[in-house]
Amino acid sequence: MLCKTFIKTEFKHMPRIQNEFADALATLSFVIQHPDHNYIDPIRIHIYEQPAYCFHVEGEPDGKPWYNDIQRYLKSGEYTEDATSLQKCTIRRLANQFFLSGEILYRKTPNLGLLRCIEAGEASRLIEEIYVGTCVPHMNDFNLAKKILRSGYFLLTIESDCIRYVQKCHRFRLMQI
């Protein structure tokens, strides 16, 4: 059996939706025919010890909006001076999901729509305005986030910001009792 030739073997059940990488490798192996059928070029895969979360941004430490690096890359093709090769690769990958129109950055959606990227301060005002304006049906945190996205705005941390805002609402806490 092939498993005996490896130093360590680990089997994990993966739901089909999370198995896209394996499907892509299987398709790639079917499409590419190597002249020497007994030899396959190695495919290098980087495995990191901890997962990386791109959609978890605590704040804007340098005073610039969260999307500043993406906007700069789309505008001039340049990176910040201290960017590592991994950061440059991440910016290039993320930039494919965005569109720059003048000075305004938009995030592309799967249905070819555009969501305007907003800063954290603008998002706080928007969350409060939408929540207070529609507090009669008293929506929960995820519905608030969806409503902001349907309104045409995008922020990486919109869901966590909405959760924090709704939890602070005294009416919400009273309704939970």
Image: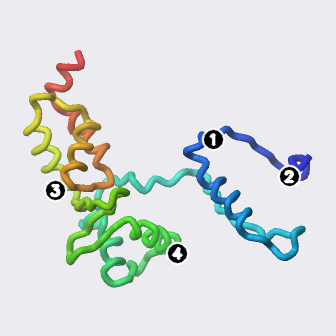
- Would residue 84 appear left or right of 151 to someone viewing this image? right
Give the number of the disc on residue 85. 4
Label 1 sits on what residue type?
A: Met
Give the number of the disc on residue 14. 1
Q: Which residue is mark 2?
A: 6
Tag 1's secondary structure? loop
Residue 79 x, y percent position in the rendering: 40, 79
Sequence order check: which comes first, mark 2 or mark 4? Answer: 2
Tag 2's secondary structure? loop
Q: Residues within 10 Å of mark 4 (few under 14, many from 20)?
A: few
Looking at this view, is 157 or 130 the one in front? 130
Sequence order check: which comes first, mark 2 or mark 1? Answer: 2
Cα separation between marks 4 and 3 = 31 Å
Sequence order check: which comes first, mark 3 or mark 1? Answer: 1
Looking at this view, is 15 or 31 the one in front? 31
Q: Which residue is mark 3?
A: 122
Looking at this view, is 3 or 88 the one in front? 3
Are discs 2 and 1 less than 8 Å apart at CB? Answer: no
